[in-house]
Amino acid sequence: MSRQQFRTNTNRSVQRTKTPKESSGPGSIYGALSYDSGYSHMSLKSEAIPRSIQRPEAPSGSDREQHIHNVKIIIAELNKATDQDRRIAAITNACAEFDHWDTEKHDIELKLGSSNVLCLVLSMTDNEDEIRMICAALEMVYRASTDAVRNTFEEVGPAVVPLLLKVLERCEHDILKHAKVSILNISKVLLYFSRVSELRAIMAKHDGMFHALARVSTSQLDPDARVLRMRVIANLSNSGENKIMIIRHPSLLESVLKIAALDLSEGAREYASASLMDLASSSNTQDAMANNDKLLATLVKLAVTDPKEETREYAVTAMQNLAFSKENRARLVTFSDGVVIEALKKALSTDTNDKSRRRAAGALTNLACDETANLMIGHEGVLQVLSRVAIHDKNNDVQKRSCLALTKIASSCPIESEHFIVLMNSLVTAASSANSTGIPAVFRVKAREASKREEIARIPGLLDILAQMSTGKAYSAKDKENAMRAIMHLTNETENRKIMCNKVILNALVVAANLDNVGSKEIRDSGIVAIERLATEVTNRQYMARHDGLLVAIAKATERESKSELAGERQSSPRLAKQLLLSLLLVM
């Protein structure tokens, strides 16, 4: 069903789903679909302007020129400040000038070199007040556009990142005045850098970056600082180059899991969940993550118990991503006595977030394969939830994915399974959904199994739903053909012919036999064959002969066969319509 699966919105993370990939195999129905990895756009949930502050209009020409003049003076003052008093005065002026939310002005500040000189001053001082003020000023100037941040980073990044990491470590480990404020401002600067996609891989390669980020779960940080740190981790997790590095780091993944499972801050857990979702989107990380017991248990906990719907959604998407790898499916289905399946079942049936339910259905679809289908069918309540959601869920996409999950499980289920009838009953229930496309194909495939035909025909409601599918306007031509083919296969069983000679089935067969458009030839021919087979049961003939429209339909079929024979057309099956018509007329 990583930042897609599941997909750009700066208010909330959005999932985008790549086109489902189709893979064919033995017993597959048009190829079994799997939902590719889901992705989020958590990095676009940027450090937005506070709601209480409206974005100012673009500066006028005179205002812009005045700002340029002021910035140049401040840069000159910072460069000339040789003693502490002058530096503090210059930094104070810088903070006063830079403390606004005008992106264009911040772009000007960066272009003129304000970040360069602030980093230089920071590298030359050990004064705690100066450190606090410089970190605050840096946070202000980096409120600029991503283009401006990217361009400046190319010039000062190699120097500023190690410097900020060094100050950050000092703030966390030493008794430093205003340490909490400096930690927040440094974390914001790192966040601004990480919002630029091209900088994420570069940031991750800085010595000490991952160790600094890993301290999110061990340092005594305020909730806001933990959230900011987790946001940086989530953004870095969005880079393909970083994913395997994060998974292999000795402590970073462990810290993310600790925050996800235990942190009291909803925001911190949300970004931890988003990070896990993105990490799980890479084929290079999926196997290692699926074999991590703590990681799977954490995803289950987040998906089932977290009060924030985005956090649950990301956790479910992570499970969907992990299930995309064929090698992981049996592991996920059997982990801790099926706890992953149970979590997905609960998310699908009870989560109020449409995206979470859609992803849960996608995850169940991904998990279904020849190796796991019987285990999934045997898990209490899975089939019932899928069939119920396929009919009653308010979201059409969730209905469709639930139907797809059912059809994929059914196509992978061995015919000798002890759960076969339970599965078929669930398919019959789901078939009444307006989004049940694909289910008639399963009925067709299963009806071809000679050993199961008698059992299938006696499943309550199955014959009625096949008749409805073969003639209903809501169904596609392919669904109608598959339903009629299923009926035809079932009439091939001698023991079925009496119970299938009923008004509902005969009505459907008459409709099929009367189709005269070119695209309906397969449906029409299947209907005629089914009528012929039912008529081989002598006790059926009188009832069939009196059925409204049936003799007319057979007469038309006889006429078509005669024309075909006169034209010298070859037939793949014997021409039996004339004999059938005569046999039915004899019992009248």
Image (spheres, helix red, strand yellow):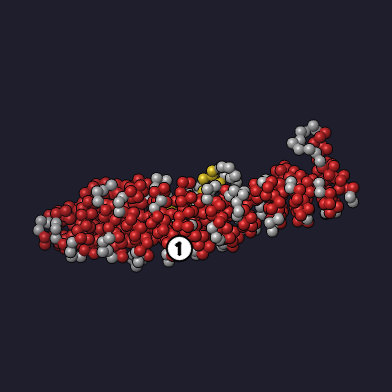
Kindly identify the amino acid type of the residue bearing the numbered disc 1.
Val
Give 419 or 192, whichever is nearer the viewer.
419
Residue found at x 34% / y 61%: 259
Residue found at x 29% / y 62%: 225
Few, some or many C-alpha atoms within 10 Å of disc 1 (few <14, some 14-19, many ≥20)?
Answer: many
Q: Position of residue 279 (x, y in %)?
A: 39, 51
Q: Secondary structure at mark 1?
A: helix
Q: Is 522 left or right of 555, judged from the image as shown?
A: left
Residue found at x 79% / y 32%: 568
Q: Residue furthest left?
A: 83
Q: Residue 395's image quarter?
A: bottom right
Q: Is residue 307 above or below residue 572?
A: below
Residue 497 visible? The answer is yes
Q: Position of residue 526 (x, y in %)?
A: 73, 45
Q: Position of residue 32 (x, y in %)?
A: 56, 46
Q: Residue furthest top?
A: 568
Q: Is 375 left or right of 537, judged from the image as shown?
A: left
Which residue is tagged 1? 304
Q: Residue furthest bottom?
A: 52
Residue 149 visible? The answer is no
